[in-house]
Amino acid sequence: MKKPFLLLAGQSPGLFLVLGTLLLSGCPEQSETRVDDQGASYSAYDWQLPENIPLPREPADNPMTEEKFQLGRHLFYDKRLSVNGTISCSSCHHQDKAFSDGVARPAGATGTLHPRNSQALVNVAWYNTLTWGNPVLSTIEQQIMLPLFGDDPIEHGINGANSEQILMNLQSDPVYAPLFAAAFPEQDEPLFGDTAYSNIVKSLASFLRGLASFNSPFDRNELSASAKRGSALFNGEKLECFHCHGTYNFSDATVDRHTSYIEAQFHNNGLYNIDGLGGYPEPNTGRYELTGTAHHMGQFRAPSLRNVALSAPYNHDGSVETLEQVIRNYAAGGRNITSGPNTGDGRMSPYKDSFIVSFSISDSEIADVVAFLESLTDEEFINNPRFSNPWTESSPQDSAP
């Protein structure tokens, strides 16, 4: 895969590497005892989280602020941040679909189809890796570089030939100057200086980091009888869903400020076996694409299941249309494709995860598991005006699909 164009004048090469968690320690007085939690309970940003949810990590070079969140919100919905003014981030990430897009594979600004399904942007601040299959993309700032500046595939299509004009389009809008100034008060020219694109990336990352969803019926303990039965199945050893979709974020790729270490987890769920040797169709070979290690073939990160009922179609390539079909694939121990270019029996893949084993399940039990998954839908999240398009309907920035 080609490397994205990096337009970050005046910045060091390590700008988008994680520099560590914010450390805030106090100097206790002699008469009292304090516990220094290394900043685990402090943030300048109001995360609006339930008490049982730990704060996510914040990069030391991009701590959360409300001002950066609001600037990022404007940029997220602005089509001018693309080569031809046809797409914004929100073109592939719709709020009513938990910031997924409802199609198997989205198209970029030039019409190029992306090889993978648009993931829902739910609680991305709590992931230890970003994207479906890249084990080294560990910050949102790093990930944002790919859709903005990448050329394989082209998404926003920003490059050396058009980046100046795209930036001038943003600079000409009087809305942006005060937003940039408020978000980066330590800079003299945050919109017109050499750090403009760096500031765009940091603001977009702040908006995405702030997309928190923890107010579903599950969180409020308001499960129906069917959802309760589905929860028992989901968390039982018969289905074993919880091994890859555990924790408060329903993903084994979850980290927070209390996490000292977690190994990046990727899984092969037996979707393909096109050559009888466990092969996946190009270019969607998962972690194998980056490592070239045979047993990494078809391994992808387990996404959070929060709001999963809104983010169909499913799996890394959007090839499974419904939650019922997802469950039936797991019940079969993988997917057997009997015709077409991807013919092959994924159930027999030598690289399939050890937890993907067949199990018997009735139609009513499938309905119960689906009811449980539907209980993870957060209606407040998909209707929260803080996350919505800030531009008026009559403005050219409006990116409603």
Image (cartoon, rainbow, N blue to C red):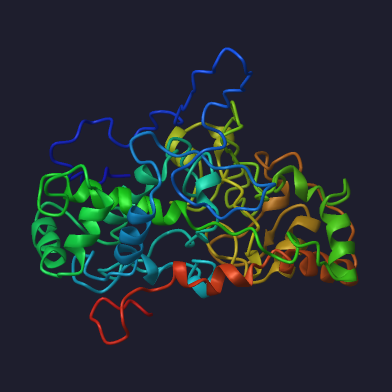
Q: Nearer the viewer, residue 39 or 337?
A: 39
User: For residue 137, what is the image quadrant?
Assistant: top left
In the rendered structure, the answer to whether residue 155 lies left or right of residue 217 reads: left
Determine whether 149 is above or below 229 in the image: above
Q: Residue at x 23, y 46 (%)?
A: 198
Place of residue 142 in the rendered image (x, y in percent of width and height, measured from the top left): 35, 42
User: For residue 222, what is the image quadrant?
Assistant: bottom right
Place of residue 231 in the rendered image (x, y in percent of width and height, measured from the top left): 84, 58
Determine whether 354 is above or below 309 in the image: above
Q: Residue at x 40, y 46 (%)?
A: 64
Q: Quadrant of the C terminus?
A: bottom left
User: For residue 337, what is the image quadrant?
Assistant: bottom right
The answer to whether one can see residue 356 in this image is: no
In the rendered structure, the answer to whether residue 290 lies left or right of residue 124 reads: left
- Outermost residue on the bottom side: it is 394
- Outermost residue on the front side: it is 31
Place of residue 238 in the rendered image (x, y in percent of width and height, measured from the top left): 88, 50
Q: Nearer the viewer, residue 36 or 366?
A: 36
- How many numbered discs, if any? 0
Q: Quadrant of the N terminus?
A: top left
The answer to whether one can see residue 396 in this image is: yes
Determine whether 230 is above or below 347 in the image: below
Place of residue 112 in the rendered image (x, y in percent of width and height, measured from the top left): 31, 66
